[in-house]
Structure formats: C-alpha cells, structure tokens
Image (cartoon, coloured by chain):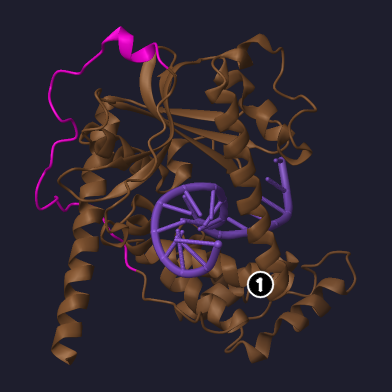
Amino acid sequence: MHVARMFILKRVVSFGGIIVLPCTSLSACSLSACHRLRSTKRHSPYSSVDSERYSSLVKSVMKSRVTSQSPETLQAEDEHIYGPIVKAQLPSSRPDMRVPKTLHPFLHCEETVEAEELESGPPARISSKRGQDKSSIPSVTRILQQTLSPEQIFYLERWKKRMIAELGEDGFKEYTQNLFRQGKLFHSVLEDILMSGESWKNKSSLETPEYPPEIQGYMKSISHVLEDVSAVRAIESTVQHDTLNYMGIVDCVARYRGVLCVIDWKTSEKPKPFLSNTYDNPVQVAAYAGALNNDGNYKYQVQNGLIVVAYKDGTPAHAHQMSSELMLEYWKTWLLRLDEYTEQRSSASSAFSEKR
DNA sequence: GGATCCTTCTTCTTCTTC
C-alpha cells in the first residue's frame, strides 16, 4: 500500500476511533467526512463494517503502528493538511559518527586550580570585551542557531506553523515575546539574588511578594536547587575562547552540591525530566565551560555543568548535573558544530568573492 | 547617544484501552 495513503488511514482511524473504508485520495476521504462519521450514532460503530472483507487492511494498519513516523512521512502528511512548509529542507538524520577536525582540549591545563581564596571575593561579572570587533567573534547562540540539524529545523518550523494556525501571526508574536520577557525577568531576578551573597538561604521560601508575580512560580520551582548552590564565582559573565575565537555569556559559575559547575537556568512550559529533553542546552553549557577554561580572565577551570529547568506553576525544577565525562562528550559535539559553522562561513565568503 | 550584540524561548507522532 502506498505510504501516504497509509498515514491518512492511520490518522482517520485515530480521529474517529472507527475503521473506515480504504480511500484512494485525500479528497475521497476528507476530514469533514470523518467528522460526519464521528458525529453519527454512537452505538456499535463497527456494526456497518464488513470486518472479514477488511481484516487484512486492519492487520496492515495495526502492524504499521510499530513503525515510528519520520520527519519525511510527517512532512508529506502535513503538506496535505497545512500545505508545504516554506523553509522546509529534506530532513535527514545526522548520526554523529564524525570527529572534529581538531580535538581542541576542553581544559587549558590538566591541573585544575582549586585555590580557596578564589571563592572568597564577590562573584565576577566580566562584561564583553571592548575595543574588539565583536562582529567578527561569533557567539555560542549564533553558532548553535546556524548549525541546527535538518530535523530540528523541520520540527521547529512545524511547531511554528501550527502555533500560527492557532494563534494567528500577531498572537504568535505576542506569545514568543511573552516567553522571552519571562525568561529575561527570571534571569535578572536570579542574578540579583545570587549577587546578594547567600542571603537567599535565610529565606524559608523564595516565593515572596517582592518578586514580580509572573515569576514567583519559577522562584518557588528552583528554591530546592538554590539550597545546594554555594560559592558563586561568576554571574552573567562573558567568556571567550582564546584560540577557537567564539564567545558567550555564562549564566552562573558556582558550586552545586560541592562541585564547581557552569550553571544554565532555563524556564520551560513543558516538563524536561531528562537531559535528553533539553535539546542543545548541554552543548551550550559545554561550549561555555570550554571557553571559560581557555579564557585568560578566569584563573580556574570548570569541568562540570548543570542545567536547571524551572516551571511556572512552581513544580520543583529539574536539575541535570553533567559529569566531566559527559561534558567532554558534549565538548566534542560542540567542536563539530564549530567546524560546521566555519565551513558555512568559508563557503559563503568564497561564493561572495566569486560573484565579484 | 545610537547601533549592535547576546540572551531570553520554541522541537521529538498521537490516540485508545485495560
């Protein structure tokens, strides 16, 4: 049976919970027809079906359920329903069997400086270096954005399209602006708290009226994580890799349960109970740590990472601690992304000079 | 002082039945 037709059948089956006749095209089996079927009498929905005649069809549909849908098949199906995705690329899986061109070390030197006196002063806050052409130094965020996998681009476009269909262009714009505003507010309040020494530990709860109402839930969400945070060394501080030539801003460097970590705070609408739910966040953290370790402004090394996902309803945040081994793995992934970005840039610039 | 940059988020199929 043709693959696309199979999906239509599958979706129809799930829409109405009714087995319908095989159809040769979407027009022959429109969604409105399905709704009509759905709204008909509820008693014994299978009574009108010649089950013997369609038993092989039913079997084949059921058998196909073990096969997961891929971006290719979803795209074909979505194009029937929503029309083609404007920026769609042919998705292909990217099994990372590749190795970075150069395996730059994650740490600047093997001996990690652990001098206690470094922890005594206030947290560092190095703002971006002045007097340099910043446009020539790409940021971690930009590199990650420019090197998203085709799958990521596909699912993000698909999500955007669905959201616009639901909220409209303006509604979608407002929705994303609101997400950004909340994230920024959360970060800035957290920054103040962490700058204030460890006074947050004297509070029984971070859910106090002094914080803006829209982020009180997030503060409650992270309160149990903050209990384990100590010795804050840097907040919202610029890091720049001396040789790999990229920069970024780390949210926080502190000890979490006694281990020095690069900490990244995130707000999320969906629960992210596993590290694998956080998409590129681990790569981002490894990139920051690698930059910090190779930035002359910082006299210490950080081998571990922590991603904290906070929730608006106050549900306890998920804190994903990354071991030094895991950080090294993500460091390699980061180096690959960096290679990819460099290749993109060089091919773009050579195309530009050819044009001229 | 204005312009620009970084960052802030968003993704992974989806439903019923027991």
Q: In this view, does A12 lie above or below A263?
A: below
For mark 1, what is the residue? A164
Question: Dot 1 lies on which element?
Answer: helix
Left or right for A86, reference A337: right
Q: Is residue A196 above or below residue A43?
A: above
**x and y percent of residue A352 in the render?**
20, 84
- Note whether A327 is above or below A339 in the view shown: above
Chain B representation colour: purple
Q: What residue type is labelled 1?
A: Ile
The color chain A is rendered in: brown
Residue A81 quadrant: bottom right
**Circle count:** 1
Q: Nearer the viewer, residue A35 or A113?
A: A113
- Percent position (x, y) of residue A83? 57, 84
> Is A110 inside the magenta-drawn segment?
yes
From the viewer's side, name the closer residue of B15 and A286: A286
Asked if residue A103 lies left or right of residue A279, the reply is: left
Judge left or right: residue A14 versus residue A110.
Answer: right
Is residue A292 rendered magenta in the image? no
Is most of the magenta stretch helix, strand or loop?
loop
Where is A73 relative to B7, above or below?
below
Q: Give the range drawn in magenta.
A: A92-121
Residue at image position (26%, 32%) is A297
Could you say which quadrant of the image residue A340 lies in? bottom left
Q: Residue at horizontal 54%, vertical 24%? A: A194
